[in-house]
C-alpha cells in the first residue's frame, strides 16, 4: 500500500490483528522512506452500494464518509472508538442486507439515527438536529419532547439555523462542523 504521506509505493506491515469483533483486520504499516505510520483495515464487502440522494444524484457508498459524520456527532463524548467502529460496521452490514444495490440517503440517515440513539443521547440529538434540519426552534423542542429528552443539559443549539442560510455566528462548533460536511452521504450536496 502506498504511503499517504510521501507517496512511496512500498510500505511494510508492522502488526496485523483482528478488530471490531473479528469483522475486520487492522494493520499497522510504516513507510521506509519517510518513517510515516498509518493503519489500514481489511473488511468484507458483500456488495457494492449506491446511495441515491434526495436530488436523485447517485454516488457510491463511502464508509469513511459515514464514519466522519458519526465521529462529528460523537465528538468529545468519550465513547470507545471500537464501539463506534462496531456501530459503523453494523450500519454497513444492515445496508448490505437490504438486498438492494441502490439505497436512498434517507435510509442511511435513519439507520444512523437509530444506532446513535442507543449509543449516546447527546450524539443522537446532535445528529438529529442537523439531519432533520429543523426549520423552527419549536420543531426542535417538539422533537426533543417526543424523544423523551429534556433540552436542559443537551449541548446543542436550540435555535437551529434556517435551511440554506447557516448562521455564521452560531456558537456551536458541533453544528458548524456538521453543517460543513456532506452528512454521511445523506444530504444533497
Ligand atoms: Zn512515506
Image (cartoon, helix red, strand yellow):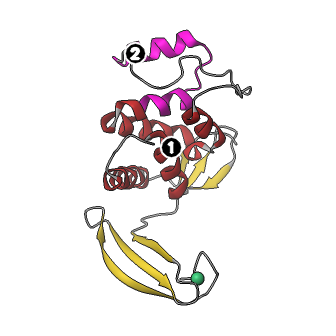
Q: Quadrant of ligand 1?
A: bottom right
Question: In front: mark 2 or mark 1?
Answer: 2
Q: Is the distance from the Cβ of mark 1 to the nearest ligand 1 atom less than 8 Å? A: no
Q: Name the dominant secondary structure of the magenta segment.
A: helix
| Disc sitting over residue 115 in the figure | none
Disc 1 target residue: 72
Residue at 58% across / 35% down in the picture? 173
Q: Work out whether residue 51 or residue 28 is closer to the camera in this orientation and state it.
A: 28
Q: Is residue 84 above or below residue 37?
A: above
The residue at the point 58 percent across, 17 percent down is 159
Residue 174 painted magenta: no
Q: Quadrant of residue 45?
A: bottom left
Please give the residue where the numbered disc 2 appears in the rendered image.
152
Q: Is residue 141 magenta?
A: yes
Mark 2 → mark 1, Cα distance in angstroms: 21 Å
> How packed is label 1: few (under 14 Cα within 10 Å), some, or many (20 or more)?
some
Q: Quadrant of residue 15?
A: bottom left
Q: Looking at this view, is 101 or 53 the one in front? A: 53
Q: Quadrant of the C terminus?
A: top right
Label 1 SS: helix
Determine contact: label 2, label 1, CB under 8 Å.
Answer: no
Q: Vertically, is 17 above or below 61?
A: below
Give neighbour class at mark 2: few <14, some 14-19, many 20+ (Cα, 10 Å).
few
Q: Residue furthest right?
A: 165
Chain part drawn in magenta: 124-148
Q: Is mark 2 within 8 Å of ligand 1?
A: no
Amino acid at each position: 500500500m502506498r504511503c499517504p504521506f510521501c507517496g512511496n509505493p512500498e510500505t511494510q506491515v508492522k502488526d496485523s490483528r483482528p478488530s471490531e469483533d473479528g469483522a475486520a483486520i487492522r494493520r499497522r504499516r510504516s513507510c521506509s522512506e519517510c518513517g510515516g505510520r498509518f493503519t489500514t483495515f481489511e473488511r468484507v464487502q458483500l456488495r457494492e452500494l449506491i446511495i441515491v440522494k434526495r436530488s436523485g444524484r447517485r454516488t457510491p457508498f463511502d464508509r469513511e464518509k459515514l464514519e466522519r459524520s458519526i465521529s462529528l456527532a460523537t465528538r468529545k463524548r468519550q465513547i470507545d472508538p471500537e464501539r463506534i467502529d462496531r456501530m459503523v460496521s453494523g450500519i454497513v452490514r444492515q445496508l448490505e442486507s437490504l438486498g438492494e444495490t441502490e439505497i436512498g440517503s434517507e435510509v442511511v440517515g435513519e439507520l444512523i439515527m437509530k444506532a446513535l440513539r442507543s449509543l449516546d443521547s447527546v450524539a443522537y440529538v446532535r445528529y438529529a438536529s442537523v439531519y432533520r434540519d429543523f426549520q423552527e426552534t419549536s420543531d426542535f423542542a417538539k422533537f426533543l419532547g417526543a424523544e423523551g429528552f429534556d433540552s436542559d443539559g443537551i449541548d446543542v443549539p436550540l435555535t437551529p439555523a434556517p435551511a440554506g442560510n447557516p448562521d455564521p455566528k452560531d456558537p456551536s462548533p458541533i453544528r458548524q462542523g456538521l453543517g460543513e460536511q456532506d452528512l454521511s452521504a445523506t444530504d444533497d450536496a
